[in-house]
């Protein structure tokens, strides 16, 4: 599977936008500065994200971008597909002409992997990524992190740990 910088940067920029959601439009220059992503590259990505109705632009002074939908309704797969990032581990792009115009011996394996990857990326929402990042930032700032015991027990336990 190839996941190029286009998909990675789009997801990173959307997490940044989600972290600043609700505080007015966010400029691409702000995202560029925080995430060290080229402004011209962000302009290309956000054009595609806007056409796929994941972000909306606000023109004029104080303009920028904000999320077009609730973060819980946007998956990582939505973001990656919006910027034309192929999620494909097959050699043939799914055309089944991998080897001398015939399906290769491992085609079904790679096609199944594609499906699993797509299902996983479709199950992870922007909200989950943003909340995870906020929790990490809060732990770093406050020096306290909430740790949940995820082992199978009759009751959920949580403890507070000083970082």
Image (cartoon, grey):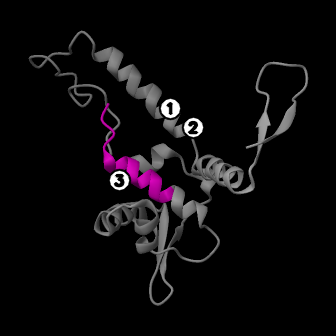
Q: Position of residue 74 (x, y in %)?
A: 55, 51
- Which span of residues is magenta-colored? 1-14
Q: Quadrant of the N terminus?
A: top left
Mark 2 and mark 1 in contact? Answer it, CB < 8 Å: yes
Residue at the disc numbered 1: 119
Distance (Cα) linking label 2 and label 3? 18 Å
Q: Residue at x 75, y 55 (%)?
A: 142
> Would you place residue 8 above or below residue 54 in this image?
above
Which label sits on residue 83?
Answer: 3
Nearer to us in this view, 130 or 112? 130
Q: Position of residue 92 (x, y in %)?
A: 20, 27
Q: Residue at x 45, y 34 (%)?
A: 118
Q: Quadrant of residue 38?
A: bottom left
Which label sits on residue 23?
Answer: none
Q: Residue at x 11, y 20 (%)?
A: 101
Q: Quadrant of residue 37?
A: bottom left
Q: Main secondary structure of the magenta part?
A: helix
> Would you place residue 42 above or below residue 151 in this image?
below
Nearer to us in this view, 56 or 147? 147
Residue at the disc numbered 2: 123
Identify the residue at the far bottom of this view: 61
């Amino acid at each position: 599977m190839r996941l190029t910088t286009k998909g990675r940067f789009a997801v990173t920029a959307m997490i940044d936008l989600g972290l600043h959601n609700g505080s007015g439009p966010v400029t691409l220059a702000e995202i560029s500065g925080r995430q060290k992503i080229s402004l011209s590259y962000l302009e290309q990505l956000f054009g595609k994200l806007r056409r796929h109705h994941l972000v909306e632009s606000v023109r004029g002074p104080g303009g920028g971008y904000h999320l077009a939908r609730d973060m819980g309704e946007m998956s990582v797969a939505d973001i990656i597909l919006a910027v034309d990032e192929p999620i494909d581990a097959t050699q043939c792009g799914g055309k089944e002409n991998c080897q001398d115009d015939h399906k290769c011996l491992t085609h079904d394996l790679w096609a199944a992997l594609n499906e699993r990857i797509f299902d996983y990326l479709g199950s992870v929402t922007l909200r989950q990524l943003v909340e995870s990042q906020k929790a990490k930032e809060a732990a770093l700032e406050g020096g306290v992190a909430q740790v949940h015991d995820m082992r199978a027990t009759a009751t959920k336990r949580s403890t507070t740990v000083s970082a």
